[in-house]
Every structure is written in structure tokens, then in C-alpha cells.
Image: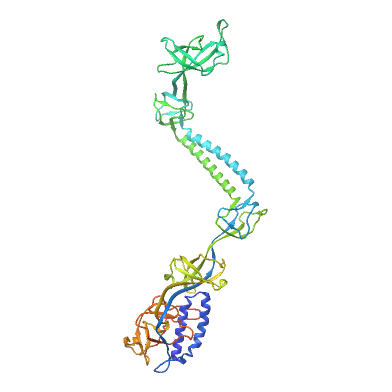
Amino acid sequence: MGAALEKSTHVRRALAAAWRRKGPIQRKWLLLAAAAAILLIAAVLVFRGRGRGRGEAAYLEAPVERRTIASTLTGSGTLLPANSYTVTTLVEGDILTADFEEGDLVEKDTVLYEIDSSDAANNIEKSQISLNQAQRNYEDAADSGNIKAAVSGTLFSLAVEVGDEVSPGQEIAVIRDSATMKLTVPFPADDAKGFYTGQAAEVLLDGSFETLEGTVCAVSGSDIVGTGNTVTRNVTVSVKNPGGLGVEQAASVTIGGVGCAASGTFTYQAESTVAASLSGTVAAVHAREGSSVSKGQTLVTLGGDALENSILSARDSLRNAELSMDSTQNQLDNYTITSPIEGTVVDKQYKSGDTVEGGKTLCTIYDLSYLEMTMDIDELDIGKVAVGQSVQITAEAAEGRTYTGVITKVSVLGTTSGGVTSYPATVRIEETEGLRPGMNVDAEIVLEQAENVLAVSVEAVSRGNLVLITEDSPSASGAEEREAPEGYVYVSVEAGVSDDSYAQILSGLQEGDTAAYIPSSGDSGMMVFGGMGGVPMGGGMPGGGPGDGMGGGPGR
């Protein structure tokens, strides 16, 4: 019974390693297999074999043959939607509209709820008024340091320079528009009544007797009674300055063949004295005497602490008004609730006519364009899992169907429980007919696969990659020089892909060979062995200790 007891230890250790590779459903069957295997060890001696020595062991013989081997990882999990969103409200009020039902497919930004917003609209109007006033105040403050031309014309004089201190009312500049001159003269009232704006006029300069063309630009509406009871009306004529006309020049005017009652002197089209409106220091001068300037053009810029403080204060007030407006506007937006995603409404808790409080859940939306699950991968296997790997999915609720998923994420953050660390891997399933969120599913990842390759039971490969074969096997000619049971020899092999039952043999064996080993159970070939890629050693399972044993026939 010594060999049987030794084999029992191997079985326990092998199942412990397999336990860590399986999902919850497979683990249930492993527990049953473990119990059955221990019971069956006692019957090992009934297997056909050619044992020798003390008769402690009997070997199961199996031919080396070709198989398809797949190394897999399994797990289980619960299906989740691609995305889900719980729609809540930040405001309270009466629900005016809720034109959707559970099960409806809604597009992104579809209006779900409209809540009465009359109070919020009033607040917005008040905020807008405050914002407009703050904007005007800031613009005035920012522009208060700029002294501008009131009219277009020639800068006749400039009374300040950079660095000068000015006070309110102080003259800064004089601007004259001399391109057009005006002349106001009296006409007999009866004649002047017939004149009109835009009428041609003839202007005769005193002294030079030069004649210029003019245009009536104004006719007085009131009469003037002069000496001798003469009645006149003033008429203003504009004349383009040919150059040289000044305010000291006198002239007479003839309109429609009627001469004026008296001559007059020219005035400028426009003349403006620019004065400072506040105190400050001249920071910049933007025009020179004699240059042409336009109405609204900045002539001088003032600076100083008082002016800067005034601008900053106005700017702060404007920003506060903007923030208040944004906040109020956002509050108004909160009264119209839209779908944040495209998806299916799975829960509707409020309808039209209901009164809702802030913070309440209104409905829930699922994006069912695909489903996801999470697999927990053992720390010993996490290095074999990568994004893009294919995953086979099955569900008891969809019996007889297999779905294909793909790994989209492998977490670097693991969780440890019972001394074992696992890492979550996210699996995406595109074809979801027959599946729903909340269903429990099993998943299998094919790590490696070899088709039509030489294979033996994993139990036949002992530590050091030795296989016990019959001495009449073709490969027995390359046997190791070590003692073996009667009728058998050991050969050294190179192993490749393996699964729970079989291991690929890359070299050392050939078709026609017969391998021998002590089986762990009558219906399972599962055994842990060392030195082969993809097959871990050691591990534990509930009720069992750490395992490091190997299958195969013991040497002597």
C-alpha cells in the first residue's frame, strides 16, 4: 500500500494546483473528483501492468498517439451592460413632461423630463440685467483713462506730454475741422423763406473778390428785425476750404440771384476743446500737433493707482455678475433632463404630473450594444493573459450556445484572498442574442493550442521530464541509464503544450511507443508535473496542504 499512499499525496497536490486554475462551477466538480480519486487509489493494483519488485505498484499502459491539445484558463462571472447611467435631478418641482416608457430605446441627448422652471426663468432675467450693468461699468472704467477726440479734424494744439499730472476739466487738446468752412449771413426774410438745404450758393471773398461754390446747410426759422424795421433771416452756407481760409476771412453770399443783406466771417466746420474727466498721469500720447485725427480716436492715455483700482474693481464686479449668470443659467438647464447615453430605459420611477425632490433617481438607462464580464485570473496565470485574446462564453440560461468574447482590459491591481492573489480581466461580448445583464456565465481562454501532435498523459511525465515506456517501444533504444521497473525503461523527453490531461511531446518519443504510469483515478488523467511550459507546480485547495509532487512511475 506504500505506493498507493504516495499516489494519494500526488493526487491531492495535483488537484490543489488545478483548483487554482478553475472557476466556481469547475471547482465543484473538482471536489467530487478529489473524493472519488482517493477512494479509487486503493483499487490501483487491479490495473493491468507488469510491475516488478515488491509489487507495490501497478502501471497503466497507454500508447503514444497524436492528439489536439489546448491549454486553457477558466472562470465565471456576471454579465454587465456596456454602459449604464442612473438619471437623477438636481432641482425640485413638478414634472411637466416624461414622454418615454420602460423598454424604450432613446438616443443620446433625447429629452426625458421637463420640470417647471418658472422661478428659475425669473432669476435668469434678474441676473442678465445685473450682468449688462456690470459690463457697461467695466467698459466705462477701462476706457476712462483714454482721452478721445470728440470730432474729426486737425489737432490744432496738444497741451500735455508723457509724465504730466492732469486734473478734471484741464484742457488737453484743441481739434479743428478746417476742410469745410461755414459762413452765416443775413438775407431778406421774404427771400430767405424760399431757400432750402442743399441749394447752391455763390460765395464772394472780401479783399480778393475770389468766388467759391457753396451749399446752403441751414436756414433760420425766425426773423430778425434790424435798423429801419428791416426784417432778415440768417442763412448758413458751407464751403470746401481750398486752403488758406481762416476765421478772419470775410465774405458775402448770393443765393438764387438774391444777395445777402450783410457779409460775415468764416467759422470752422467743427472745433472742439478736449478736457480731462479725471485725475491721473499722462502715460502715453498717441497724436502730434498738426496731424489729422478722427472722431473717437484716442489722443492721450492716463494712468495711476486710482485709475487702476477703479478698473480692477469694475472687473471684479463684472466677473461676479458673469459667475452669477452662469450659475443661474445652469440651474435653468437642470430643469430639462436629457439622456446622457444612447440606450434602453430599464427603469422609470417618475412620470408626468409627479412632484420630484432634488437628488432623486428618475430613471435608469442601459447601453446594450455589447455586454461585459470580469474574470478573476490567478497570479500564476496572469502573465499568460493579454488584451485581444479570444474567450469562449457559455451560460446555463442559453443552453447549447457558445459566444465569443475578447479581453479588453487586464488590471494591474490584484486582490488577495486566502493567500491567493487574482487579477480581474474584462471580457467584451459583441454577439449577445439570448444574453442579458445579470446572467451568470462561464468563460474559457485558450492560451496555447497544438493540433495533431504526439501526446501522452500528463501523469506519465515525471519530474525531470522523464517518461516510463515499455522496453519493447521503438524509443527504448534511447533509454536513460537508470534503474526502472521490470519490463520498462526511462527516456528523457521535451514537453510542449499541455492541458489537464495530456502533454505534447516535442522529442524523445515516437508513435508506436507505449508509456506507463500509475493513474490518479479511473476517469481523470489530471496530474501536475514539472518542467513543461504553461503548467504550474505547487498550490493549495481547501482542506489540502501545499503540493509539489509529480506523477509518473517512481524510480528505484
Q: Nearer the viewer, residue 451 or 37?
A: 451
In this picture, is 245 found above or below 16?
A: above
Along the viewing direction, whichever of 122 and 310 lies nearer the viewer: 122
Residue at horizontal 61 percent and vertical 44 percent from the top? 123
- Which x, y percent locates residue 482? 33, 88
Toward the right, the furthest residue is 353
438 sits to left or right of 74:
right
Q: Is residue 114 left or right of residue 459?
A: right
Where is residue 98 shown, x and y percent of the image?
A: 64, 54
Q: Looking at the image, which is closer to me, 98 or 230?
A: 98
What residue appears at the point 57 percent right and 12 percent down from the top-left corner? 223
Image quarter of the N terminus: bottom left
Quarter of the image that includes the C terminus: bottom left
State the residue in front, 115 or 515: 515
Q: Which residue is pictured at 58% across the width and 42% down the height?
A: 127
**Residue 512 position within the rendered picture, expressed as x and y whole percent measured from the top left:** 37, 86
* Scheme of colours in the image: rainbow
Residue 172 visible from this viewpoint: no
Res. 141 in view:
yes
Q: How many marks?
A: 0
x then y, percent, for residue 373: 51, 67
- Residue sticking out furthest to the top: 228
Considering only vertical position in the picture, is 454 above or below 98? below
